Image (cartoon, helix red, strand yellow):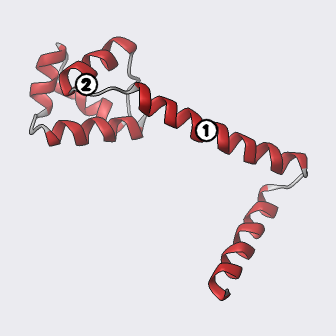
Amino acid sequence: MRIIGNVIMRRRKELKMTQNQLAEKLGVSSTFICKIETGSTPLSQKHLEGIEDALGMDFSNYFSAENQLLNKWKAVINMFEDHQLQPEDVKALIQFITHIKKTG
């Protein structure tokens, strides 16, 4: 949620719109907008659509990209699990790869 909130805040600021102005357009309080932007409150479909309209945004591409990234990470995690790697093994592997990259 925090990432979506940051995207909303950046777009709102690009448009030189205050939280109060966005809140008015959505019929909510500025406190609610603050909570959305900080990721401390869930965002309903209704409010998401209202924000898209008010800020001229389309989140469908954003969610698609997020799902693709999530699926890639799930595949990596599954690969680690298939090889019975524990978190400390993965950490050691990353440290090793980082060392190799630094030393060439």
Residue displayed at 16% across by 41% down: 13
Residue count near mark 1 (Cα–Cα under 10 Å), binned few <14, some 14–19, many ≥20: few
Q: Which mark is residue 56?
A: none
Measured as percent of width and height from the top left, residue 11 is found at 22, 38
Measured as percent of width and height from the top left, residue 14 is found at 16, 42
Residue 64 falls left or right of residue 40: right
- Viewport quadrant of the N terminus: top left
Q: Which mark is residue 70?
A: 1
Dot 2 amino acid type: Phe
- Viewport quadrant of the C terminus: bottom right
Q: Quadrant of residue 67?
A: top right
Closest to the camera, between mark 1 and mark 2, is: 1
Q: Residue furthest bottom?
A: 103
Would you place residue 47 above or below residue 55 in this image? above
Residue displayed at 26% across by 22% down: 51
Measured as percent of width and height from the top left, residue 19 is found at 15, 32
Q: Identify the secondary structure beneath mark 2.
A: helix
Q: Quadrant of residue 28?
A: top left
Would you place residue 102 above or below residue 46 in this image? below
**Marks 1 and 2, how far apart at CA:** 28 Å
Residue 83 falls left or right of residue 76: right
Residue displayed at 9% across by 26% down: 21
Toward the viewer: 102 or 37?
Answer: 102
Residue displayed at 39% across by 14% down: 45
Dot 1 amino acid type: Leu
Q: Identify the secondary structure beneath mark 1.
A: helix
Task: Count up the numbered dots.
Answer: 2
Measured as percent of width and height from the top left, residue 25 is found at 13, 17
Q: Which residue is mark 2?
A: 32
Q: Quadrant of residue 44?
A: top left
